[in-house]
Image (tube, rainbow, N blue to C red):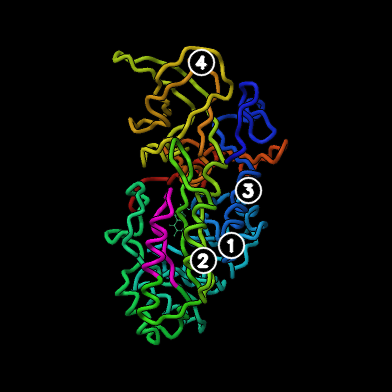
Amino acid sequence: MHDFHYKNGELYCEKVLISTIAKEYPTPFYLYSYNTIVGHFNKIKEAFKDVDPLICFSMKSNSNLNICKALVNEGAGLDIVSGGELFKALKVGCSAENIVYASVGKTEEEIKEAIEKGILLFNVESVPELIMIDTVAKRLNKKATAAIRVNPDVKPYTHDYITTGTKEKKFGVDFKTAEDIFDNANKYSNVDLKGLHVHIGSQITEAKPFVEAIERVLDFLKKNNIEIEWLNLGGGFGIVYEDEKASTAQDFAGKIVPLIKDKPFKVILEPGRFIMGNGGVLVCKVLYVKTSSAGKRFAIVDAGMNDLLRPSLYEAHHDIFPIVKRESETHKYDVVGPICESGDYLALGRELQEIIPGEYLSVMGAGAYGFSMASNYNSRPRPAELLVMDEAVKVIRPAETRQDLIRGEKILKEFKAK
Ligand SMILES: Cc1ncc(COP(=O)(O)O)c(C=O)c1O
């Protein structure tokens, strides 16, 4: 559920008519619905209340400070994957005790910072990383706390690029390695091994893969007589982009909670997409319409793959809604951006009302992995991010300027080696 809806043929975000926003702010821009985002967070909280999880919002899905702050205010912790995200997490006042840190490539410097700040858990992805954490912690004369990320080799039935818990992927360690780590825990005297982490992928629409992964983890704990304080189930709850039969938070919880309810560990969840995906759209303007000699219609808009990469990267589907509906014939359009790549598109062969240059389109389901994956490719400033709260519209990140495009760059006085 989300709060983007039509009334009298015009698209609203909460109580605000998107066409009025588009008159005031240059396109493209991201537009988020506060009520949708907080609503999704609370749906997970309510559904999983019997295990009272620490819900660490996955910042990689959207790391705008205001989005993170809004969720932290609701009681969320944060799931980070870099020193940059740690910096932003602390900036929004998230207690370090509510921060968990995954990533297969944490640098020594990033590890040092995270230990110094006292994060809740490193999600450790390899033995060399564990050795590095232990070494750094020793040097700092501190004890780091960690969960071992296991790769349970479970198929999540999602796009290959967002499958993480099968054995050929780079994430986590297999159960045998995890067993060795726990057996030799005293080797890592400055790391307190407090838990297990299992994140099997993203945009998973049914509970079955989670159940399989959890069963394997529970089996592992039992067989090896390992006691943990935390079980981190990762993120991955899928959403409806097109016609998926996505499970609700209640559906997921209905299958997951019974498995972990009476266990002697606390639970962490790391949802990103479920909270943010349908909480945001990308609004763009149609620049031109043209028909190729092959009879193909292109709607060329002012947003491209630099603004929203998902269609180009994953062939992901995003609904395209006109912000004003008209009575007209429909045609099939490729909705494409201005970037010099044939892979630069937002939608292909999409049946839409007759598109008129100058009109606005809303690319739906763009709140997660939208702005956070945006780039300056083709020297295009990244778009603004706006947050709607009932009838208010707040700029939570202004559009970048030309000056932002050259920030930090210096032209050498002369091109000589010495
Ligand atoms: C370790 C980890 N946790 C959580 C997430 C968030 O996943 P999602 O946005 O599907 O909930 C990801 C995303 O890839 C991840 O890698």
Quadrant in the picture for the N terminus: top right
Residue 186 in magenta? no
The residue positioned 66% from the left and 36% from the top of the image is: 14
Instruction: Please state which amino acid type lies under the numbered disc 3.
Output: Gly
In which quadrant of the rendered view does residue 394 lie? top right
Residue 107, relative to residue 412: is it above or below? below
Residue 32 spot, x, y in % from top left: 60, 40
The residue positioned 35% from the left and 79% from the top of the image is: 223
Instruction: Please state which amino acid type lies under the numbered disc 4.
Output: Ile
Q: Is residue 43 visible?
A: yes
Distance, label 4 to label 3, CA atoms, is 35 Å
The residue positioned 58% from the left and 67% from the top of the image is: 98
Residue 215 in magenta? yes
**Residue picked out by circle 3:** 39
**Callout in the foreground (1, 4):** 1
**Residue picked out by circle 4:** 356
Magenta residues, start to end: 196-217
Of pointers 4 and 3, the one earlier in the residue sequence: 3
Residue 215, relative to residue 282: is it above or below? below
Seen from this angle, which residue lies furthest right? 391
Which of 265 and 374 lies nearest the eye of the viewer? 265
